[in-house]
Image: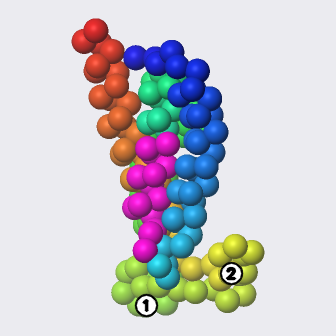
Amino acid sequence: MIRESVILNSTTRFMITLLIMFSFYLLLRGHNLPGGGFVGGLVGGASFALYGISFGVQAARNAVFLSPPQMIGWGLIAALLSGVPALLYNKPFLTGWWYHELSVPIIEKFNTPLLFDIGVYLIVAGVTLNIIFALSEAELLEN
């Protein structure tokens, strides 16, 4: 159901950018403080739920870069790949590794826990969007 509200539509266009930036902030902050991939993925998925309420489910599906099943798949790949470096050094799977040579401006040192958190972010956002889109489309079919 598309809401015909100028205020809601205008606010959504502004808020979706802020919510996605906040979800990335939560993702990157999660190693040292509360937050991380799970909370960031929920906020990212909820931002597109707001977009779907304002502009319709199909518009929200078109606004998402990857489809929800693709997000889940890429998230699983990222989470699994975060454990590979530990296996290469005969350590337990998912042992954290920090690469001091590879420095990224915002993140500082690239590490495998961050790659795992990115995977969790994608999985949670994909599952959240999948559920929200399915429920919204079921409601449209009933009406």
Answer whether residue 103 is visible to the viewer in this image.
yes
Q: Residue at x 58, y 41 (%)?
A: 16
Mark 2 → mark 1, Cα distance in angstroms: 26 Å
Label 1, on which residue? 90
On the image, the x and y values in percent for residue 8 come to 53, 28
Q: Secondary structure at mark 1?
A: loop
Answer whether residue 84 is visible to the viewer in this image.
no
Say how the picture is coloured: rainbow
Query: Is residue 45 depicted above or below 108 in this figure?
Result: above
First-in-chain label (2 vs 1) = 1
Q: Which mark is residue 31?
A: none
On the image, the x and y values in percent for residue 139 come to 29, 19
Say whether residue 103 is magenta: no
Q: Nearer the viewer, residue 49 or 76?
A: 49
**Neighbour class for label 1 at 10 Å: few (<14), some, many (≥20)?**
few
Q: Secondary structure at mark 2?
A: strand
Q: Nearer the viewer, residue 53 or 61?
A: 53
- Magenta residues, dominant SS class: helix
- Numbered range of the magenta stretch: 34-47
User: Could you tell me the amino acid type at mark 1?
Assistant: Asn
The C terminus, quarter of image: top left
Q: Residue at x 45, y 45 (%)?
A: 45
Q: Residue at x 47, y 29 (%)?
A: 52
Residue 79: quadrant of the picture? bottom left
Query: Is residue 123 depicted above or below 111 in this figure?
Result: above
Number of callouts: 2
Q: Residue at x 70, y 73 (%)?
A: 106
Label 2, on which residue? 108
